[in-house]
Image (cartoon, rainbow, N blue to C red):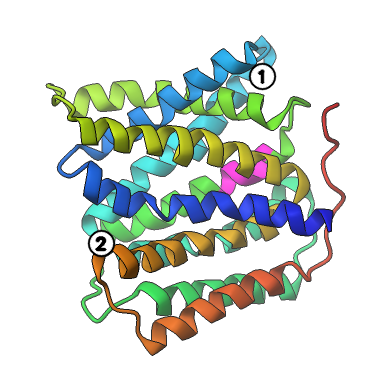
Amino acid sequence: MTETRDLALTALAPAIWGSSYIVTTVFLPGLSPWLVALLRALPAGLVLLLLVRQLPPLHLVPKIILLGALNFSVFWSLMFLAAYRLPGGVAATLGAVQPLFVLMLSGALLGAQIHGRGIAAALLGMVGVGLLVLGPEAQMDLWGVLGGLGGALSMAAGVVLTRKWQPGVPALTFSAWQLTAGGLLLVPVALVALPEWPALTGDNILGLAYLSLIGGALTYILWFRGITRIAPAQISLLGVFSPLTAVILGVIFAGESFTLVQSFGALLALFSVWLGQQAPRPAPVAKPA
C-alpha cells in the first residue's frame, strides 16, 4: 500500500508537467523560453528557501550546483532547443529515451543490476510515447535531435545523482536547494538572451505563478521525495504521464483529435510503467527523521 501511494504521489509530478504546454500557449504566448525557465525555477526555489530557512552546508554546495544544472538549467535549455527545432512529438519521443539512460547510469554510478524487464519497459514506454504524440509531419533536425537526447541524458543523470547524493534532509529542503541553484544558473543565460525584458501582463503572471509554484515547487518536492523511495529506473518510467497529460488536455481544451493509434500508444505507455514496477527493487534510501 505504501509503495502504491509513493508511486501515485510521484506520478503526479510528470502529470502536472504535462500541463505546461497548454499553460504556456494560453498564458505565456510569445515570451522567451529562457525567461519562462528562469521565472519558473528561481521564484519557486526562493519561496521554498524561505519556508525551510536552511542553506546547504559548504561541502554540499558543488553537488547542489551540479544537480541544479542537470535537473533544471541544462535540462530545460536542451529541451527548449529540441522544442524549437523539432515537432513536439519528435521532442517528446526523444525525451522518452530517458529511462534507458537511467538504467545505464544506475548500473555505472549506483551499482544497480540491469534487468531485462527494465530494458523492455523502457523500450515499450518509448514506443508508446511515439505512437501517442508522433504525427505524419514529424521531421528530423540534427541539432534538435542532439538537444532532445542531451536533455534526456541530463535529466537521467540528475535523477541518478539525486538518489546517490541524498543529504539526509527532507524533500522540501532538497528541492529548495536545487531549484534555487538551477534558477541562479539561468540568470546569465536569460540576461544574454534577453537584452530587454518584456512587460508582463496579468495572464503572464498567472501562468508563471502556476508554472513556478505548482509546476515547479510542488512537483519537484513530490519528484525528489519519490527518488528516495523508488528506484531511479522505475521512477523514470513515470515520465510517460507528461505527454499523456499533454495530449488529454489538448483534446479537452484545444479541440485536438485523439486517434485509435494514440489510444494504443497510451495503453502501451501505461503498460510500460506497470512492467517496470515488476523489476526487483533495491533498498530505499534512508529517510530523514
- Whether residue 231 is visible, yes or no, is no
User: Which quarter of the figure has residue 101?
Assistant: bottom right
Quarter of the image with the C terminus is top right
Residue type, numbered disc 2: Leu
- Whether residue 93 is visible, yes or no, is yes
At horizontal 55% and vertical 22% (from top left) the residue drawn is 48
On the image, the x and y values in percent for residue 120 come to 65, 77
On the image, the x and y values in percent for residue 206 come to 30, 34
Q: Which mark is residue 60?
A: 1
On the image, the x and y values in percent for residue 104 come to 65, 58
Judged left or right of residue 116, residue 105 is: left
Among numbered discs 2 and 1, the one appearing first in the sequence: 1
Judged left or right of residue 210, residue 7 is: right
Q: Main secondary structure of the magenta part?
A: helix
Q: Which residues are magenta?
A: 156-162
At horizontal 38% and vertical 56% (from top left) the residue drawn is 148
Judged left or right of residue 50, residue 261 is: left
Q: Which mark is residue 43?
A: none
At horizontal 14% and vertical 24% (from top left) the residue drawn is 199
Count of numbered circles on the image? 2
User: Which quarter of the figure has residue 141?
Assistant: bottom left
Q: Residues within 10 Å of mark 1 (few under 14, many from 20)?
A: few
Quarter of the image with the N terminus is bottom right
What residue is disc 2 on? 86
Residue type, numbered disc 1: Leu
Task: Report helix, strand or loop for mark 1.
Answer: helix
Of residues 193 and 54, the one drawn nearer to the viewer in this rendering: 54
In the image, residue 127 sits, relative to residue 222, either above or below, namely: below
Task: Report helix, strand or loop for mark 2.
Answer: loop
Q: Confirm whether the magenta stretch covers residue 159.
A: yes
User: Which quarter of the figure has residue 11?
Assistant: bottom right
Q: Confirm whether the magenta stretch covers residue 34.
A: no
